[in-house]
Amino acid sequence: MALSVVRRGMTSLRGVSRHCVAAPVPVLRPQIATIVSKALRDQDYKRPAPFPYKTDKYGFFAALLDKTTHRFDENSKVIVVDGPIAAGKTEFAKEIADELDMLYVPHANMDMLYINPYGYDMRQLDSQLPDSVKSFDEKNFLQNPKDPNAAGFQFHMFRLRLVQYIDALAHVLSTGQGVVMDRSVYSDFVFIDAMANFGYISKPARNLYYECKAMTVPELMRPHLVVYLDMPVDVVLQRIQERNLPHEVNSPVLTREFLSYMEQVYKKQFLNEMSGHSELLVYDWSEKGDCEVVVEDIERLNFEFDKNDPKMADWKLTDEWDWCKQRMLFTKNKDKILMWMNVPGFSVPELVVNAEDHKVFEDVWWNAPGMKYAEGFNADMGDQFIVTKTRVGT
């Protein structure tokens, strides 16, 4: 297993106070330049109580009472694991997250869109829908990449990865616990570029994608560390055959040419871009390596840089209120980022649905099991809620 430390970067802050509510404004300590495993952490260490960002809105008044940096510790960082298909990223990311006591964030997939909170698979509605609004997921793309819905599929994937990354930032800033992500929004463009290069989506669709990306991704805070599991294309093809998933083995997409192009974009663009902002570890993962060795390599990294160094400036906030404003953006106000995905695409035919088809979609989708009302208010799914009746007159 070969290791290459391509770039270094990033710092994190730790405050004095560890109170969750009505905490005094903390004095920011010198930046912490390390990540530590559970084995090296003080056994008596207890993370401060988290802010319940998933259920409570973190707005202006909440920020006055509950500051941010007092929850930070050495591992209040974002780690992204990336690499080619079938590289073993999922297993690796889970192991790293466990060793570092971080939250594991799985790779985004279309189940997140099609399976509703009650477990109902919305793909079951396809028989009632016109072709232009039927479901289209990863399996569909790998089997029929030239389908007109392919472009819409990749836009959905970008939005899912965007939401997922925003939520990951909200988790770090609201709990102090770091995250390990299986892929992220930052490498999503690798897929769109490959799809456009092989004619699976149009060039106008690709251009619109980059407009959406330019309006949304710069609002985020880039990861502290990217771990790239590298494998030659021949090994990738072998791994695909070994795991023997029908939609992959027989796919017209996963060819040597397509995978080679993706590898080129990954290495020449993605890794190059991320190396200017994040620590970057690249491993030859042709044969599965030892995760404990990787953890040791991570512990040796120095995340501290001069304050004037442009590297990872996203995390070099020195004012407590600036941290609170970032936290508000990624929790209560994340829709302000997502709304920039609504860039009009009327010049891209494969992203336009006519009014008739859209009306059918609305009628079918929002009358599906568990979709008529907000979660928790669907009696047909067993929800029990309070209905207040007002008597008029006597």
Image (tube, helix red, strand yellow):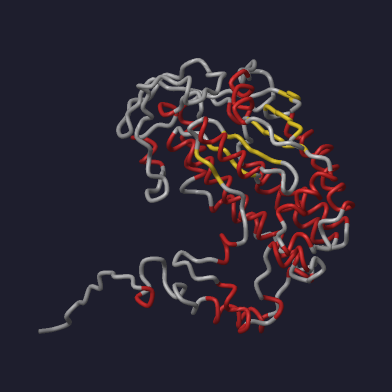
What residue is at 62 percent from the left and 18 percent from the top? 300
Question: Seen in the image, is 316 located left or right of residue 383?
Answer: right
What residue is at 64 percent from the left and 27 percent from the top? 294
295, 71: nearer the viewer: 295
Farthest residue in the left direction? 394
Q: Quadrant of residue 142?
A: bottom right
Question: Seen in the image, is 368 located left or right of residue 222?
Answer: left
Q: Is residue 62 above or below residue 247?
A: above
68, 141: nearer the viewer: 141
What residue is at 36 percent from the left and 40 percent from the top? 62
Q: Is residue 281 above or below residue 199?
A: above
Residue 86: % across, % down: 72, 48
Residue 293: % across, % down: 63, 25
Number of numbered discs overlaid on the protein picture = 0
71, 266: nearer the viewer: 266
Residue 256: % across, % down: 88, 51
335, 60: nearer the viewer: 335
Q: Is residue 351 above or below residue 274?
A: below
Q: Quadrant of residue 276?
A: top right
Q: Quadrant of residue 81?
A: top right
Quadrant containing the C terminus in the rendered view: bottom left
Residue 389: % across, % down: 21, 77
Question: Seen in the image, is 207 located left or right of residue 137?
Answer: right
Quadrant containing the N terminus in the rendered view: top right
